[in-house]
Image (spheres, rainbow, N blue to C red):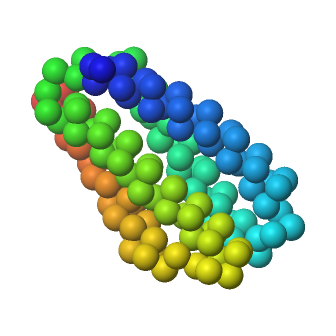
Amino acid sequence: MNDILMTQVFGAFFGFLGIILGAFGAHALKKRFTADQLTSWETGVKYQMYHALVLLIIGFNLGFNTGLENAVAWLFVIGTVLFSFSIYGLCISGATGKKWKFLGPITPLGGLCLAAGWICLLVYFVKEFV
């Protein structure tokens, strides 16, 4: 699969899943989660949706002819999986009383990947501008 299509597929998939997981959290998990868990779940959904949209935008606007463009897409994909899905795992496992503590350090790694993706995108735009 070429990088443009990969970016669009992940963007659409993350967007679809963001809607499903957001509704699931707001309705099905409302009675099982604490207020903090619901807030964390919502944060995971928001970040997933933001990056679904940005993946679609860059998928339709970048040519993916450079390593920097590819790095942006992959950092957003990997960062979203690590960040949002570790939050989901922490929330669900915490609600069952068997919190998967190994996921705790994964969340900030995902955040670092997302931040690195944004820095790479900034560098790409600055290079195009200069």
Q: Residue at x 62, y 80 (%)?
A: 98
Q: Is residue 20 above or below residue 11?
A: below
Q: Position of residue 32 (x, y in %)?
A: 81, 69
Q: Residue at x 29, y 40 (%)?
A: 74
Question: On the image, which quarter does residue 95 sit in?
Answer: bottom right
Relative depth, front residue between 21 and 111 = 21
Residue 119 in sight in this render: yes
Residue 16 placement, left or right of 35: left
Quadrant position of the N terminus in the picture: top left
Q: Is residue 94 above or below residue 58?
A: below
Q: Is residue 17 above or below residue 69?
A: below
Q: Residue at x 58, y 79 (%)?
A: 99
Q: Position of residue 104 (x, y in %)?
A: 45, 75
Residue 51 placement, left or right of 74: right
Q: Is residue 99 above or below residue 60?
A: below
Quadrant position of the C terminus in the picture: top left
Q: Position of residue 30 (x, y in %)?
A: 83, 63
Relative depth, front residue between 28 and 41 = 28
Q: Position of residue 111 (x, y in %)?
A: 39, 60
Relative depth, front residue between 41 and 58 = 41
Residue 115 in sight in this render: no
Q: Residue at x 30, y 46 (%)?
A: 75
Residue 8 placement, left or right of 69: right
